Amino acid sequence: MIYTIIIFFAVLAVMVFVHELGHFFTARKLGVKAEEFGFGLPPRIGGWKKVGGKWKFFFGNQPVEDIQSEDTIYSLNWLPVGGFVKIKGENGEGVAEPDSFASKKIWKRATILSAGVIMNVVLCFLCLSLAFFIGAPQIVDQPQSNMAVADQKIQIVAVVKDSPAEKAGLQIGDVLLEIDGQKFTAIEAVQAFVGEKEGKVLPLAIDRFGERKEFAAAPVKLSETGKAGFGVGLATSGIVSYPWYAAIWLGLKTTIFLAWQIVLAFYTLIKNAIVGLPLGVDLAGPIGIAVMTGRVARLGFVHILQFTALLSMNLAIINFLPFPALDGGRVLFLIIEKIKGKAVNQKVEQIAHTIGFALLMLLIVVVTGRDFFKFKDSFINLWHKIIS
């Protein structure tokens, strides 16, 4: 469990840090002063400030305005989750000052606000490209000359409803280890063996998230094939690696595909919520993501890379939604400013962002509460380990 927590915070820290780094570098490049760049979240332990052309370390959590520094303050903070950047004029102050965010043209402000999202997309691309290069799990149905395949195995990719497999508890993603004590290397051999055992209960050994599990099921004659089977779809998978140039290309294609699929998922969620239909997708809060991180972490580094890519793309798309308090919401106010020819009243915008932030926090609380009851057994086991 401790390992899960460490991996969860490490993944979260990388995503947030990369996001804030995008805002930081873009702001400096476009002539806006970054007053503070924090490693971790406040309260501050201390940091480095520039005085007389030299960098000096200081302790304390005093306001940025009280720290005399000739350049950005680089701070260390107590909460080790990502980081943050404090940009001069981000709340509308300093309109007359040339190094203030508020004094810049609309396109520059929009670029600075969008940079964090762009960096999360870049992180997704880098994680996927690295995974393809060092070797990632993949269905091996059409081997190519530039791929190297290792650790081939037979995996369940579909489970028929009300089939012996579903009733036994088999799931998509399970790896078939043994049937009735026999191991198989080809799907055809599995089908031939099971096809001759109609009505006989067979013990099954499955690998699920790196853990061996035992099941039992009796093959029945399937209407889809006319032969005896458990009611599962099988595919040969393996750890597939590519040359660096092919890995980059596949990383780019997968990043685009992933972005499109997540956008479609959010479209379905929002549409169904408006018309009163079931959401169609499942939401997970910090607890749910932490539990999923633990499961992924047990599978190995490559799976952590893929999971980080997925979370990073989700963060990018969520953050760019035109909702107050998010980067997309701030860009929306810039679009309104462009259309109107003048800035939106600062108090009105701040109220909108405050309400938006409160609604987001409420959503997180609700989803987190649901996750707690969904995964309560994990927390009960953790508590028992702590007090035992």
Image (tube, rainbow, N blue to C red):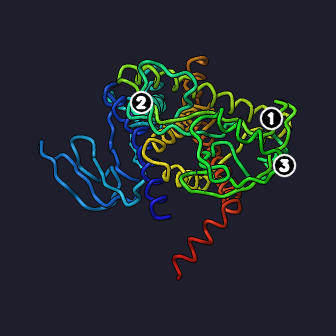
Q: Camera-side residue: 224 or 377?
A: 224
**Residue at point 45%, 29% (across, down):** 125
**Residue at point 70%, 59% (across, down):** 374
Q: Which residue lies under the disc numbered 2?
A: 241
Residue type, numbered disc 1: Asn
Residue type, numbered disc 3: Gly
User: In the displayed structure, would residue 386 be above or below residue 346?
Assistant: below
Do residues under tags 1 and 2 come within 8 Å of each other at their CB atoms?
Answer: no
Q: Which residue lies under the disc numbered 1?
A: 272
Residue type, numbered disc 2: Ser
Task: Using the rendered image of the protein, determine whether residue 102 is visible from the camera's viewpoint.
Answer: no
Q: Nearer the viewer, mark 1 or mark 2?
A: 2
Judge from the rendering whether residue 222 lies leftward or rightward of residue 182; answer left or right: right
Measure the alpha-carbon separation of dots 1 and 3. 43 Å
Q: Is mark 1 on a helix, strand or loop?
A: helix
User: Where residue 135 sits in the image (x, y, percent)?
Assistant: 42, 34
Label disc, if present, on residue 227 of the rendered structure: none
Measure the alpha-carbon separation of dots 2 and 3. 41 Å
User: Where residue 143 sits in the image (x, y, percent)?
Assistant: 51, 22
User: Where residue 15 sits in the image (x, y, percent)?
Assistant: 45, 42
Q: Which of marks 1 and 3 is in front?
A: 3
Q: Is mark 2 on a helix, strand or loop?
A: strand
Crowd class of label 3 (few under 14; some 14 to 19; many from 20; radius 10 Å): few
Dot 1 or dot 3, earlier in sequence: 3
Label disc, if present, on residue 199 of the rendered structure: 3
Measure the alpha-carbon separation of dots 1 and 2. 39 Å
